[in-house]
Image (cartoon, grey):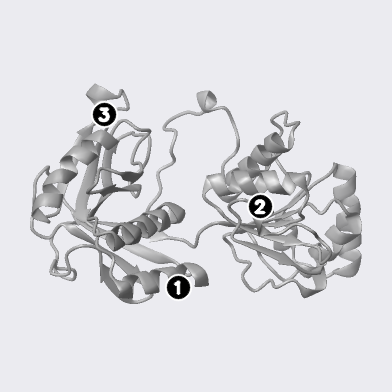
């Protein structure tokens, strides 16, 4: 959800330059089931524009309507949306509405936090009553510094209201090593998923960042000069140079890292040959590193085209990093979303 909050902050800052006020809508609690879980947010602008969504598209008009009183009074409030009678989702959403006026100090700390890939926390005070109440509001905690989202006068230490705390990890990142046509498609689909995308290409590659819509960076380098310092547990890596020797060199360069996932293209025999030679170069490689290597990358969903292969790869990354066994949802018992503590 980090990328969604990033989009919200960027749009709020842009609106502010035009003198347009913003209201942040945050789902802070849920009774039953719903399309999205607590922690999802959207931004409502005073001109009627909306950024993001807190549902599949059915709650947003009510959020826009309810936000009008916050625009007029500047006072935060809780609204509820009962989907049991309107949507058939069998859930009641509790949504905190508050003015969102990001200050320069916050925006500097926030974007610095994203760049340095530092986790942060969003803390919201609320109650399950559809009314205006003293103490409603949110803070963003970056390192040990608290930034008020809308009302710096609300109590923090002694606030008696319920608290929703959401730990926000660094934005998930995919490093695509390769610059062929299939890499372009994987970049596009990863961007749609909300991931940060870094492209690594050979030193003689003729493509540029413009060839990879949505990519965060494009670097022409060799495996031996690859900067691995920003590779962390929120990073997936795909080796897709379509050159066995080059893939091997990059795999050797990655041996001291611990990404969330490493994907190899090509058949099982190519994977086995690659890993056998890799172990000859790096015999002391830890088992944890090897367990992160997936080849052939992707889920078996019948993919044929580069676009379909990209979907297959992204699907496996999601399933593996979230510890889910892929299956049709109609075969899953219980709730669609696994409950987790935030």
Query: In this rendering, is residue 305 above or below 164?
Result: above
| Distance of label 2 from label 1 (alpha carbons) | 24 Å
* Residue furthest front in the image: 18
Q: Identify which residue, 273 or 154, lies in the foreground.
A: 154
Q: Which mark is residue 212?
A: 2
Q: Residue at 77% of width from left, 69% of height from top?
A: 221
Residue 319, image quadrant: top right
Residue 123, image quadrant: bottom left
Q: Position of residue 254 (x, y in %)?
A: 75, 67
Mark 2 nearby-residue class (10 Å; few <14, some 14–19, many ≥20): many
Q: Secondary structure at mark 2?
A: loop
| Distance of label 1 from label 3 (alpha carbons) | 38 Å
Residue 325, image quadrant: top right
Q: Identify which residue, 333 or 223, lies in the foreground.
A: 223
| Contact? badges 1 and 3 (CB < 8 Å) | no
Q: Identify which residue, 35 or 71, lies in the foreground.
A: 71
Q: Residue at 24% of width from left, 55% of height from top?
A: 20
| Contact? badges 2 and 1 (CB < 8 Å) | no
Position of the C terminus by quadrant = bottom left
Query: In this rendering, is residue 321 above or below 256?
Result: above
Would residue 321 appear left or right of 52 to someone viewing this image? Answer: right
Q: Residue at label 1?
A: 112
Would residue 315 appear left or right of 262 to someone viewing this image? Answer: left
Mark positioned earlier in the residue sequence (2 or 3) = 3
Q: Position of residue 337 (x, y in %)?
A: 43, 38
Q: Secondary structure at mark 3?
A: helix
Mark positioned earlier in the residue sequence (1 or 3) = 3
Q: Residue at label 3?
A: 83
């Amino acid at each position: 959800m980090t990328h969604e909050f990033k989009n919200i902050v960027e749009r709020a800052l842009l609106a502010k330059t035009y003198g347009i006020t913003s209201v942040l809508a945050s789902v802070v609690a849920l009774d039953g089931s719903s399309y999205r879980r607590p922690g999802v947010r959207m931004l409502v602008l005073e001109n009627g524009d909306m950024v993001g969504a807190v549902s599949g598209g059915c709650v947003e008009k009510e959020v826009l309507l309810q936000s009008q009183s916050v625009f007029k009074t500047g006072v935060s409030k809780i609204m509820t949306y009962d989907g049991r009678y309107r949507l058939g989702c069998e859930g009641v959403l509790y949504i905190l509405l508050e003015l969102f006026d990001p200050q320069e100090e916050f925006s500097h700390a926030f974007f610095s936090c994203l760049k340095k890939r530092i986790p942060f926390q969003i803390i919201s005070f609320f109650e399950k009553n559809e009314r205006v109440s003293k103490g409603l509001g949110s803070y963003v905690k970056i390192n040990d510094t608290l930034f008020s989202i809308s009302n710096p006068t609300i109590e923090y230490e002694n606030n008696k209201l319920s608290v929703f705390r959401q730990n926000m990890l660094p934005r998930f990142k995919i490093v695509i090593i390769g610059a062929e046509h299939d890499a372009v498609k994987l970049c596009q689909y990863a961007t749609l998923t909300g991931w940060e995308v870094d492209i690594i290409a050979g030193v003689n590659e003729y493509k540029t960042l413009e060839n990879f819509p949505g990519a965060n960076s494009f670097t022409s380098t060799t495996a031996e000069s690859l900067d691995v310092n920003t590779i962390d547990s929120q990073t997936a890596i795909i080796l897709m140079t379509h050159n066995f020797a080059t893939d091997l060199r990059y795999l050797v360069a990655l041996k001291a890292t611990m990404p969330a996932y490493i994907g190899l293209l090509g058949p099982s025999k190519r994977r086995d040959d690659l890993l056998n030679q890799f172990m000859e170069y790096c015999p002391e490689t830890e088992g944890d590193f090897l367990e992160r290597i997936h080849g052939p990358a992707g889920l078996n969903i019948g993919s044929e085209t580069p676009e379909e292969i990209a979907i297959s790869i992204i699907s496996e990354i999601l399933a593996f990093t979230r510890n889910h066994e892929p299956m049709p949802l109609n075969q899953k018992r219980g709730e669609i979303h696994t409950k987790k503590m935030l």
